């Protein structure tokens, strides 16, 4: 079952762009990461790591670039997740430019939960919204 839909804004700065003034492709992964952290909650992630020695790692990424965002744009990152068994979260994330009719970037990002020794562990119960 998919989660509710979450929105996160990202301001595009000059440092985010390449020589052509378009966002460098790998930066979208950073934007998607920030959006996921916002959904899960920084406090929850810090607590998971410091108290339980648990964190999330990217297992797989499928990404399609449709249109490059540019310096000065304010992107809207749309995120939705679903559990895939007890070990994996699948995130559907899109980056939207202002007034665009289609996403600039589509991504499906698979996360797994691991412990300090990088061993796969079941995703723990954390505060909302993950286990709502």
Image: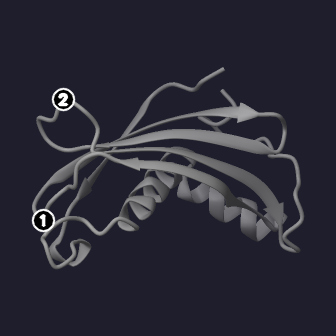
Q: Position of residue 28 (x, y in %)?
A: 38, 59
Mark 2 crowd level (few <14, some 14–19, many ≥20, 10 Å Cα): few
Q: Residue at x 27, y 45 (%)?
A: 104
Q: Distance of mark 1 from mark 2, alpha carbons?
A: 19 Å
| Residue 50 visible, this orientation | yes
Image location of residue 2, percent across then percent down:
60, 24
What residue is drawn where x is 12% and y is 65%?
71
Above or below 103: residue 65:
below
Q: Quadrant of the N terminus?
A: top right
Picture quarter containing residue 119? bottom right
Residue at horizontal 50 percent and vertical 25 percent from the top: 4
Colouring convention used in this rendered image of the protein:
one colour
Q: Which mark is nearer the camera, 1 or 2?
A: 2
Q: Quadrant of residue 21?
A: bottom left
Q: Quadrant of the C terminus?
A: top right
Q: Position of residue 60 (x, y in %)?
A: 65, 54
Q: Which residue is mark 2?
A: 101
Whether 93 is drawn above or below 31: the answer is above
Circle 1 sits in a helix, a strand or a loop, which is it?
loop
The residue lying toward the viewer, choosing from 88 and 52, is: 88
In the depicted structure, whether residue 49 falls above or below residue 35: below
The circle on residue 71 is: 1
- At x 17% / y 52%, what residue is drawn? 74
Tell whether label 2 touches label 1 (CB within 8 Å): no
Query: Foreground residue, 124 or 111?
Result: 111
Horizontal side of residue 114 vs 24, given as left or right: right
- Check residue 112 in the rendering and tell me which mark sits there, or answer none: none
Question: Disc 2 on helix, strand or loop?
Answer: loop
Q: Residue furthest top?
A: 1
């Amino acid at each position: 079952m998919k989660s509710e839909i979450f929105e996160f804004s990202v301001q595009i700065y000059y440092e985010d762009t390449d020589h052509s003034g378009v966002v460098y492709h790998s930066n979208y992964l950073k934007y998607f990461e920030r959006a996921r952290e916002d959904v899960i909650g920084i406090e929850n992630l810090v607590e998971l790591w410091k108290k339980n020695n648990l964190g999330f790692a990217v297992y797989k990424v499928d990404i399609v670039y449709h249109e490059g965002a540019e310096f000065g744009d304010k992107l809207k990152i749309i995120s939705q997740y679903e559990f895939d068994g007890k070990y994996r979260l699948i995130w559907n994330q899109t980056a939207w430019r202002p007034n665009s009719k289609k996403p600039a970037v589509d991504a499906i990002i698979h996360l797994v939960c691991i412990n300090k020794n990088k061993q796969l562990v079941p995703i723990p119960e954390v505060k909302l919204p993950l286990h709502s």
